[in-house]
Image (tube, rainbow, N blue to C red):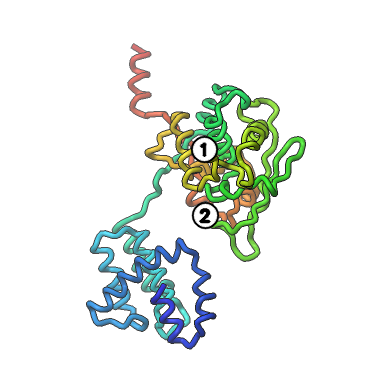
Amino acid sequence: MFVVREKLTGQGFSPCTINIILSSWRKGTQSQYNSSLQKWLLFCREHHTSIFSPSVSEALDFLTSLYHKGLSYSAINTARSALSSVLLLGTDTPFGQLPIVTRFMKGIFELRPAFPRHKEIWDLNLVFDYFRKQKPPSLLSLKELSLKVTFLLSLLSGQRCQTISYLRVDNMTKLQDKYVFPIVYKLKQSRINHHLKPLEFLKYPPDEKICIVSHLDEYIKRTAILRGNEKQLLLSFTKPYSPISKDSISRWIKSSLLEAGIDTTKFNAHSTRSASSSYLASQSISVIDIMNSVGWSNEQVFQRYYNKPIENNFNYGHAILNSINLSS
């Protein structure tokens, strides 16, 4: 974020103040901006353009150069946001919100549209049918139990792998029919006055094989002698039984999806978030309840990126051919 720091220094802010301002950008955003701003610095050197006070046309020429290099709409949009954080254009309107810039980005979308990775989401019944064929929790191996607990935690909470990695045994509450896990860490969706409420996992008496409480009971009992002083809930199932990262959680979830027959070339671990919320929406559950539970503050985010129709294997042409065969 050297360019941003230089801009703020030029505006007269002290180093300590600048450090605090720079902290407002999270590491993921800083990483994305760094790439775009490095390209901007190179463009300015090659075209003898001011880094901080170019004309709007020069800044748009930079975005145009990215388009001609084959960058996607998403990548160019990130560059637009990065420029908004550093350019001084003598107006109260940030560069990225100028009418001509929003019109330019609309043109980029028309020429190189961005489509979602998948328009449909897998059916929860496929996974639950797979789990119902497994042994009861007490008869599962530690590996099987670990993968299943991790998957159920993710699916039944609608949370990211990051959130699941923050579940701890030292601050959980075990009641007769549920487990409660408060989240005391900053999450991707954490904002001022907006924090995720404690995750509650309720007992499901009708079927022990898909009951998260039964599986947590067994998992906590089984790992008690293995964890030592480790307080993170999820541990590796091989020695030295250390806490697992969010990347390992992602791999475990993807492994369960694959075993259940889900196409993991299309769907990754994060798809459990969309699958569970889309299923609830299809059952006419209140969108407000879904948003409050999962942590979204904007319904547009849910509707645009997560609420998808359940995958349907119906094939129009195949149905025609089958009906012809039946009638003949």
Residue at point 55%, 45% (across, down): 243
Of residues 69 and 213, the one drawn nearer to the viewer in this rendering? 213
> Who is closer to the viewer here, 149 or 115?
149
Residue at x 61% of width, y 29% of height: 210
- Position of residue 301 in the picture relative to residue 50 (left or right): right
Cα distance between the residues tagged 1 and 2: 41 Å
Using a 10 Å C-alpha cutoff, classify the residue at mark 2 as few (fewer than 14 neighbours), some (14 to 19) or many (20 or more). Answer: few
Q: Which is nearer the eye, 146 or 268?
A: 146
Q: Is residue 315 above or below residue 165?
A: above
Residue 203 location in percent, x, y? Answer: 70, 34
Q: Is residue 312 above or below residue 51?
A: above
Secondary structure beneath dot 2 equals helix
For label 1, the crowd category at 10 Å Cα-Cα, with few meaning under 14, some 14 to 19 and many 20 or more, is few
Disc 1 to disc 2: CB gap under 8 Å: no
User: In the image as oriented, which residue stretches furthest toward the bottom?
Assistant: 12
Number of numbered discs on residues: 2
Residue kind at label 2, given as amino acid type? Val
Residue type marked 1:
Lys
**Picture residue at 27% right of the left edge, 74% below the top:** 43
Residue 128: image quadrant is top right
Where does the C terminus fall, quadrant-wise? Answer: top left
Q: Residue 148, labelled with which disc?
A: none
Q: Is tag 1's residue or tag 2's residue first in the polypeptide sequence?
A: 1
> Which part of the image, by quadrant, shows the N terminus?
bottom left
Query: Which quadrant holds residue 101?
Result: bottom left
Residue at figure coordinates x 33%, y 21% from the top left: 321
Question: Residue 8: x, y in percent?
Answer: 46, 82
Mark 1 vs mark 2, foreground winner is 1
Taking the view exactly as shown, the residue that stands out farthest to the top is: 328
Look at mark 1 in the image and give the residue it sits on: 239
The residue wearing badge 2 is 301
